[in-house]
């Protein structure tokens, strides 16, 4: 298992737009494995490649229902609204209220570069939106309503 260093807010890599992945390579496969290891080690529910300093359109998510790997993901449908606390491994120890769609459908490619679609509601919809924003250089802190607040270490972070 190889853990990667998680970049924190202030690192300019987090503000950049990531590039699409055009083919799977052993190196990208290793990156995905490392991203999953790094996310689980940090007790997160999602991680985007720019958070480990790689400007590629790759996201991993696990809200406790098994790993989801998204390559070149796009939101193709969304509906409803939810407002709740959100956090990010790149903003350690903090959370803030963010309004997101309550339902999101995502189109992406999997690790074999096959087309896949996922539907998410609630936390999964929130995770899709949060992680995809990272690929365009956006952080949830831009969307927070009110103030960021400190969270204890045992709370989930995205
Ligand atoms: Ni994040």
Image (cartoon, grey):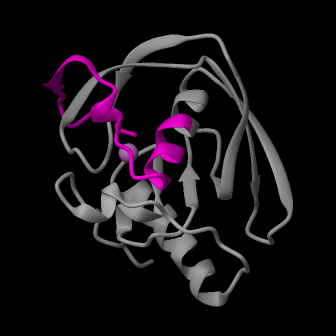
Q: Residue at point 49% right, 54% down? A: 135
Left or right of 35 in this view: 120 = right
Q: Residue at point 56% right, 45% down? A: 62
Picture quadrant of ligand 1: top left
Quadrant in which the C terminus appears: top left
Q: Residue at point 51% right, 62% down? A: 36
Left or right of 157 in this view: 130 = right
The residues colored magenta run: 129-158
61 and 113: which one is in front? 113
What is the x, y in percent for residue 110? 76, 62
Magenta span contains residue 133 = yes
Q: Residue at point 68% right, 46% down? A: 74
Q: Quadrant of residue 6?
A: bottom left
What is the x, y in percent for residue 142? 30, 33
What is the x, y in percent for residue 37? 46, 65
Magenta span contains residue 110 = no
39 and 135: which one is in front? 135
Count of labels in the image:
0
Quadrant in which the N terminus appears: bottom left
148 and 123: which one is in front? 148
What is the x, y in percent for residue 83? 43, 12
Q: Look at the picture and state if 98 lies above or below 142.
A: above
Q: Quadrant of residue 118?
A: top right
Left or right of 64 in this view: 49 = left
Left or right of 106 in this view: 156 = left
């Amino acid at each position: 298992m190889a853990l990667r260093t998680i970049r924190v807010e202030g690192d300019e890599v987090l503000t950049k737009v990531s590039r699409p992945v055009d083919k799977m390579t052993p190196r990208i496969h290793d990156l995905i494995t490392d991203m999953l290891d790094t996310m689980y080690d940090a007790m997160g529910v999602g991680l985007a490649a720019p958070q480990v300093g790689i400007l590629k359109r790759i996201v991993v998510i696990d809200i406790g229902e098994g790993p989801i790997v998204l390559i070149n993901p796009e939101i193709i449908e969304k509906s409803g609204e939810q407002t709740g606390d959100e956090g990010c491994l790149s903003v350690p120890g903090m959370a803030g209220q963010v309004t997101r769609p309550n339902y999101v459908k995502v189109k992406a490619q999997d690790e074999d570069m096959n087309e896949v679609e996922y539907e998410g509601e609630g936390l999964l919809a929130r995770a899709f939106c949060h992680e995809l924003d990272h690929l365009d250089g956006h952080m949830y802190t831009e969307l927070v309503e009110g103030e960021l607040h400190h969270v204890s270490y045992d709370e989930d972070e995205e």
